[in-house]
Amino acid sequence: MNTLSTMTRRQAIATTLLSGVAFSLLQNLSVQAETSALIAAKAPFLLPPLGYGFDALEPHIDARTMEIHHGKHHAGYVTNLNKALESAPEVAGKTLEELLTQLDRLPESIRTAVRNNGGGHYNHSLFWKSLKINGGSPAKGLADEIDGTFGSMEGFWTQFTAAATRQFGSGWAWLVVNKAKKLEIVSTPNQDSPISQGLVELLGVDVWEHAYYLQYQNKRADYLVAFRKVVDWDFVSERYATVVS
């Protein structure tokens, strides 16, 4: 009876562990699939669903900001990207990744529109996925790399926040993986995307005023403090693992 009971407990533990592994694998595959679907999408491009309620990030980012940011600004980039591509049938069928990594090969008449609106679509699609209330901490592999590159997690945040603060006017600050598969912090103006520079974005913070002005007015520093509290480190860590594997 005791042996049977022990075996039952062992089976239960084994089942739980296997379930956890399976769930982790499915999550990782989901992240890869979502990212692949985004960069492989072809015109006409679509506004992706936010994936959570507009109020999901409160009190750090308010619902009205999220509603306008996603439903107006991001939607506008998608609409304008599709409109620009209508006038250049020779690039029909290109994916978003191809458009953004081959800007110099696009017709000059649409190059700026694709750079601005295609970049806005790509940047925001990743931005929404990287946000979650109580987002936890980086997984060990990413955490170790952050410590090795920036000295500590706090060292990373100091440099990342400085990049976001120094970005004059509108733009982004990014944690990226560079061509040597090392971490780096960069900033980009407007809706320029690091993918156009051969970099892979892990985490970006939008410092356009439309991302924070309703709640924080001109206090970008306060918004950046709040942003730290809604980073989905599971998503960022899984994306990192995919890139460096």
Image (cartoon, helix red, strand yellow):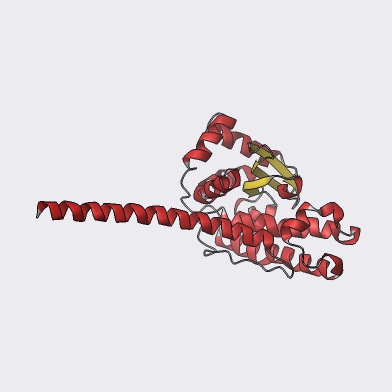
Residue 32, horizontal then vertical, whole percent: 57, 56
What residue appears at the point 73 percent right and 62 percent down from the top-left corner?
95
Q: Quadrant of the C terminus?
A: top right
- Whether residue 219 is visible to the viewer of this picture, yes or no, is no
Looking at the image, residue 198 sits to the left or right of residue 34; the answer is right
Q: Give whichever of 18, 24 is nearer the camera.
A: 18
Q: 130 and 20: which one is in front?
A: 20
Q: Is residue 182 above or below residue 69?
A: above
When the figure is inspected, residue 153 is found, relative to residue 212, above or below; the finding is above
Q: Quadrant of residue 65?
A: bottom right
Would residue 104 be seen by someone viewing this image from the given angle? yes
Q: Residue furthest right?
A: 108
Location of residue 35 (image quadrant): bottom right
Residue 224 percent coordinates (x, y): 59, 44
Q: Position of residue 40 (x, y in %)?
A: 68, 61
Q: How many marks?
A: 0
**Image-quadrant location for residue 36:** bottom right
Q: Is residue 76 left or right of residue 86?
A: left
Using residue 7 as the reference point, say whether residue 188 is left or right of it.
right
Which x, y percent locates residue 146? 55, 35
Quarter of the image containing the N terminus? bottom left
